[in-house]
Amino acid sequence: MNTVAIIPARGGSKRIPGKNIKIFAGYPMISYSITAARESGVFNRIIVSTDDDEIANVARSCGAEVPFRRPAHLADDRASTEDVLVNALETLRENGETFEHACCIYATAPFIDAKDLPTGFDALRRANATTAFAVTTFEYPIFRAFRIRPDGRLEMLWPEHRDARSQELPEACHDAGQFYWLDVKKFLVERQLFSADSVPVHIPRWRVQDIDTPEDWRRAEMMFKAAGRS
């Protein structure tokens, strides 16, 4: 295997200060992603891409490498994950290291399971895809969704499904926000984590929670405890 894990973790989180290294269930948040990468046994290197000294120190203490600093123009909230990954892969290449496959693992993914990483790697290679990433199903049929109009009234997004039974509607999935396997050569051409050449790695809903706000954080802590992982 010729693989690298890249964990993006910038400083300066506004809604949850210090989110990437804030203590979650007794450990720095980023430690869960680093531990899963280590326990998966599928990576030659585990690298954290950060602009922040404190994050770098915590990452190293958890067993990751921080061989370079992320440039300032990729360290604000407008920088895309794709841009950060391209920068990391190109920096490694400039330093004489190339990888056939890479896996982006988000730093705020405490529900990640080490066993899912080799599963995702296998899915990527079997399908000869550009990317393979964690997805889960919506808990309610999205085709019955409403929006609130400017006048405050409700309106169905897909009124043609008003009378459809839920079991008649197609199942929909969303990004689980955990990990993204890449065929490096193809990804550096497409520069998209999600494309027509992506395949899913299914994750159960009880192991999926975005953590973008303090409310998300509290919900994740309750889910983590309920799952017996704390």
Image (spheres, rainbow, N blue to C red):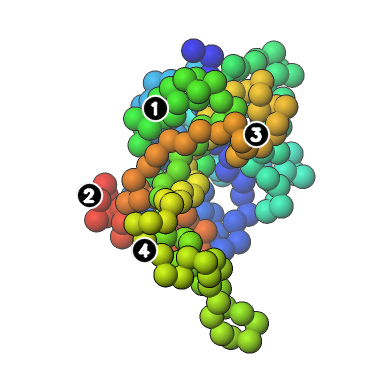
Who comes first in sequence, dot 3 or dot 1? Answer: 3
Residue at 60 percent of width and 27 percent of height: 130
Residue at 48 percent of width and 62 percent of height: 143
**For the residue marked with disc 1, what is the amino acid?**
Thr
Please name the residue that numbered disc 4 is placed on: 165
**Quadrant hosting residue 117:** top left
Q: Position of residue 220 (x, y in %)?
A: 37, 57
Please name the residue that numbered disc 3 is placed on: 85
Q: Is residue 214 visible?
A: no
Q: On the rendered structure, is 88 left or right of 133?
A: right
Q: Are marks 1 and 2 in contact (CB under 8 Å)?
A: no
Q: Which mark is residue 228?
A: 2
Q: Are marks 3 and 1 in contact (CB under 8 Å)?
A: no
**For the residue marked with disc 3, what is the amino acid?**
Leu
Please name the residue that numbered disc 1 is placed on: 119
Q: Position of residue 93 (x, y in %)?
A: 70, 18
